[in-house]
Amino acid sequence: MANHKSALKRIRRNEAVRLRNKYQHKTVRNAIKKLRNTEDKNEAATMLPSVVAMIDKLAKRNIIHSNKAANLKSGLTKRVNALA
């Protein structure tokens, strides 16, 4: 166990950041799932920009890799465009 005050603070901070990252990542995964399950093109087209923004935010904060973000955005865009 850490003996320094700064190390103890860093442990507390790491846990808080980990929980925040976990919450944001789970929220985005749920939004992606909701978008993928949508059959209405208009609804999906209105949801897409907000989901893409959420994915970009995760990539910017290094919660997910930037290549994964690009792949997710590409796949979601293709899916929305393919809806009739």
Image (spheres, rainbow, N blue to C red):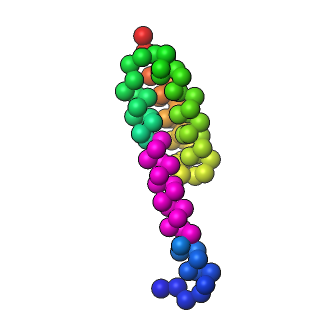
Q: Nearer the viewer, residue 14 or 59?
A: 14
User: Residue 24, how many percent across, how many down?
Assistant: 50, 49
Image position, residue 40 (x, y; %): 42, 17
Viewer-proximal residue, 4 or 66? 4
Residue 78 in view, yes or no: no
Does the magenta-highlighted stretch encompass residue 15? yes
Q: Is residue 4 visible?
A: yes
Q: Quadrant of the C terminus?
A: top left
**Total marks in image:** 0
Residue located 60% across and 51% down the image: 61
Dominant secondary structure, magenta: helix
In this rendering, is residue 36 above or below 4? above
Image location of residue 8, percent across then percent down: 56, 80
Residue at (61% x, 84% y) in the render: 5
Left or right, residue 83 beside residue 66: left
Residue 32 is covered by the magenta coloring? no
- The residues colored magenta run 13-28
Q: Quadrant of residue 67?
A: top right
Residue at 48% x, 48% y is: 25
Q: For the point 52% across and 64% down, which residue is it?
A: 16
- Rendered position, 50 above or below 5: above
Locate residue 55, reporting x and y percent: 54, 40
Considering every residue shown, the one lying at the far bottom of the view is 3
